[in-house]
Amino acid sequence: MIRVLTGLHVATAVALFSSAAASSAQAPAALKGYVSEDSPVIVLMHVRVIDGTGAAPAEDQRIDIEAGKITRVQGAKLRNAIPSNAKILDLTGKSVIPGLVGMHEHLFYTGPERGKDGLPFWIEMIDSGPRLYLAGGVTTARTAGSMEPYTDLALKKLIDQGEKPGPKLRITGPYIGDLLGIAPQLHALADPEDAGRTVDYWAAEGVTSFKAYMGIKPEELKVAIEHAHAKGLKMTGHLCAVGFREAAALGIDNLEHGIVVDTEFLPGKKPGICPAKEAADDFAKNVDIEGAPVQAMIRDLVAHHVAVTSTLAVFEISVPNRPALKKMLRAKDALSAPGWSTYLRVRSSIAEENNPQSAISLKKEMQFERDFVKAGGLLMAGCDPTSFGGVLPGYGDQRGVELLVEAGFTPLEAIHIATQNGAVYLGESDQIGSIGVGKAADLVVVAGNPAQNIEDIENVQLVFKDGVGFDPAKLTQSVQGLVGQR
Ligand SMILES: [Zn+2]
């Protein structure tokens, strides 16, 4: 509070101080309905700390939070004085992890079912998206492509001003490339100059990163990257016409989804052409993750400091009967009735078809992600709430962490990937992504011990963003039935 007052006229400062003292709360009035812990000074007592660095959990700890920051992390038994105005929360049996840094997030959802000859369409999750991210423990969300960049930017502003609940948003501009007919809502590039113009325009509008999309040609990607880098902004991509090694050579910063979408191993792949289906079939049948070409690609990405975003939750839904239906009950509550029935219908058609390809591809992707990390690569995680539906903000992020554990990472490594690694990529690791003195109090309190049982990451009790404790139940109750077609 004191820092905020620095430099203010004394009379104003006194007035502000007394109004702050009158209300002990620190959450803006508009957020009070979603908040359960609102004291300016909070002490989390007897809590297990999983700090996001990958270090072993520290048992029976105490975390002091003041004015939105972590001011102390120590053993609960040490006898440092507790601040006189502190609210003390006894968290015996609970764990605290850093707020998740979701790196493949969207603020839109799979659109309504199309009529005969209908065009594809995506709908903005203007209320439900931000609330579900926060309720799921995602305190920072980088979008990875936008359908409505102006809406995304406006949402960010409303959240930053404390008028709406939601994570700290890092907004990516509209997808850049040829959208291959997937989304008439978006601009298809005419040529490389158009790519540069598009980047410049949206950077001026306030987006802080970009995502290239499948049909983008090498020359277009090159110019887009140059324009982004000239502004100190980063470029990620869900590529197809351009292979991973080619993109790394062009200077891309991040690749989405992993090797499942890398087309470079398809024999006879033509430059600048996206052979999505053929490459996916060939990947499942013929690509060997342990083979020399893939391992050379991995080394190349690491050498070029290209990060990879894991999106296992959205791949999993294409595998017959995955995830277990009981895992979907929370999503069912948040989805509209048509949204849920669309999900169930597609789910059962995938089960009926029972094609083994998606399970093979998921397994290979997991193997790739392990090898990429082993080689020194920066792996991050996000939920990607797209495809045919069923992957929801927040819940999908939790599922992604569970799938990283299925992939062979330890729970501590998986949490590290979903927290600190994203913060490192964003250049914000001094503030977010791990638990330490001086950092923002972006913390998720969960019942149980996710270091032993990763599914405990779903038992979110409280989500602190800058020291304000949001109640996940209040957030999710406010969006029941809002996701999907209505
Ligand atoms: Zn996506």
Image (spheres, rainbow, N blue to C red):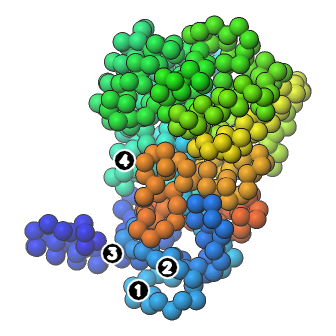
For label 3, the SS is loop
Reading the chain from its start, which is encountered first: label 2 or label 4? 2
Q: Is mark 1 within 8 Å of ligand 1?
A: no
Can residue 304 be seen in this snapshot?
yes
Dot 3 amino acid type = Ser
Instruction: Give the CA distance from mark 4 to mark 3.
Output: 22 Å
Asked if the residue under mark 4 is in contact with the one under mark 2, i.e. CB atoms within 8 Å, the reply is no
Residue beneath disc 1: 83
> At 16% from the left edge and 72% from the top edge, which residue is drawn?
13
* Left or right of 183 on screen, residue 86: left
Q: Mark 2 sits on what residue?
A: 43
Q: Are marks 2 and 1 in contact (CB under 8 Å)?
A: yes
Q: Amino acid at mark 4?
A: Leu
Q: Please name the residue that numbered disc 3 is placed on.
A: 23
Report which quarter residue 460 is drawn in. Answer: bottom right
- Residue type at the position of mark 1: Pro
Q: Are marks 4 and 1 in contact (CB under 8 Å)?
A: no
Please, what is the three-letter code of the amino acid marked with disc 2? Val
Residue 254 image point, x, y percent: 53, 34
Q: Earlier in the sequence, mark 2 or mark 3?
A: 3
Q: Quadrant of residue 259?
A: top right
* Image quarter hosting the C terminus: top right
* Secondary element at tag 1: loop
Neighbor class of circle 4 (other Cα within 10 Å; few <14, some 14-19, many 20+) is some
Residue on which disc 4 sits: 158
Mark 2 and mark 3 in contact? Answer it, CB < 8 Å: no
Does residue 145 appear anywhere in the picture?
no
| Rendered position, 476 above or below 190 | below
Upstream in sequence: badge 4 or badge 1: 1
